[in-house]
Amino acid sequence: MSDIFVITGPSGVGKGSLIAALREHRPELQLSISATTRAPRLYEEDAVAYYFLSDAEFDRRLAAGEFIEHANYAGHRYGTLRGELERRTRAGTPVMLELEVQGARQVRDAIPGAVLVFIAPPSLDVLRQRLQARGTEAEATIAERLAVAETELAAREEFPFVIVNDVLDDAVRELEALYLSQRDGAGPAR
């Protein structure tokens, strides 16, 4: 049985959409809120989407050992606050972390019982289209995210579970079945 579920994969693969849809079916599953040094997007609220931190505050918390994982991604830093995760798991609440590959590797090393799920796109071209359709980043940022995505896609074999997000509803059903089997301890821990 596991209370920590890590969803990873390249930017734009649909991790957030999958998690949101899963949480509609499984409201007991909470999403851990990450910290970041990037500026909020128009629709993002502090302490809801992310904890938006200055570089100095991120450095202070990092030096104090407050992160269970942290990573640099696309020119910004991201991390999961240890207290955020521990508060929820101590209460017996299953928690899902949405992380880039660097952070997922750190959680794998720090929490051996965590369930690690890699979300893959059907192809790199589909990923490019999804990033462009979001309309949240400049073309140069998209190109940078795609370059990182190629490296991250090569890492998919490091993760015990892989779900290809081609048709969202199918991927949500697969993720929900995996969540239930791992939460209840009925499925194989690959």
Image: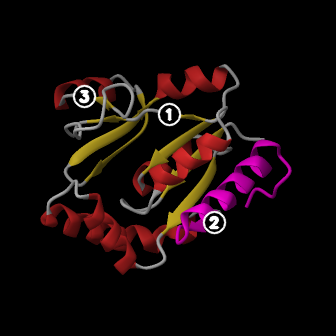
Which residue range is magenta in the image?
161-190
* Residue 75 appears left or right of 122: left
Identify the residue at horizontal 35%, vertical 33% (top origin). 50
Helix, strand or loop for disc 3 = loop
Q: Which residue is mark 2?
A: 170
- Label placed on residue 53: 3
Q: Nearer the viewer, mark 2 or mark 3?
A: 2
**Alpha carbon of mark 2 to alpha carbon of mark 3: how far?**
36 Å
Q: Is residue 44 above or below residue 56?
A: below
Point out the image quarter for the N terminus.
Answer: top right
Give neighbour class at mark 1: few <14, some 14-19, many 20+ (Cα, 10 Å): many
Dividing the picture into quarters, in which one does residue 60 lie?
Answer: top left
The amino acid type, in three-letter code, at marker 2 is Asp
Identify the residue at horizontal 23%, vertical 58% (top origin). 135
Q: Is residue 54 above or below residue 79?
A: above
- Label placed on residue 56: none
The amino acid type, in three-letter code, at marker 1 is Ser
**Among numbered discs 2 and 3, the one appearing first in the sequence:** 3
Q: Is residue 11 above or below residue 28?
A: below
Q: Are marks 2 and 3 in contact (CB under 8 Å)?
A: no
* Residue 94 appears left or right of 65: right
Q: Position of residue 182 (x, y in %)?
A: 76, 49
